[in-house]
Amino acid sequence: MDARLGDVIDDFCVKCRRLTNHSVVSLLNGAAAKVRCRTCYSDHDYRNEQAPPSKKDLKKAELFNAVLAGVAPPPAPPEEAADGASPKKGAKKPAKPAEA
Ligand SMILES: [Zn+2]
């Protein structure tokens, strides 16, 4: 769908710090390129309704990735290997009743 100049669309406004109504003020290939916040009237590039990542978020993502990279996958549980190698309780012969 092609946007038109003056169309009112939702976008994230960094000044309002939330999704607000925006008017399309510039088009690029039929899509909104620049928009103007209808609340604070500031112009900015159309962000496709995405909030720009804050420095805090970037830092958080960095830490998260560091943690992921640092944690090795846990070794396979030993029970599984033992089950295949040694018989379970049920495989053992039942104890003989004590003879009188
Ligand atoms: Zn705004």
Image (tube, rainbow, N blue to C red):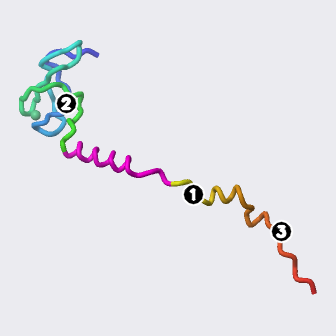
Helix, strand, or loop for circle 2?
strand
| Position of residue 99 in the picture relative to residue 55 (left or right) | right
State the image coordinates of residue 20 (x, y, percent, origin top left).
16, 33
User: Marks 1 and 3, how far apart in space?
Assistant: 27 Å
Main SS type for the magenta part? helix
State the image coordinates of residue 13 (x, y, percent, origin top left).
14, 34
Name the quarter showing ligand 1.
top left
The answer as to whether callout 2 falls within 8 Å of ligand 1 is no
Residue on which disc 3 sits: 93
Q: Amino acid at mark 2?
A: Asp
Q: Is residue 20 magenta?
A: no
Residue 36 vertical placement versus 88 (above, below): above
Q: Nearer the viewer, residue 65 or 29?
A: 65
Residue 36 vertical placement versus 70 (above, below): above
Q: How many numbered circles are shown?
A: 3
2 vs 1, front mark: 1
**Farthest residue in the left direction?**
41
Label disc, if present, on residue 77 of the rendered structure? 1
| Position of residue 7 in the picture relative to residue 90 (left or right) | left
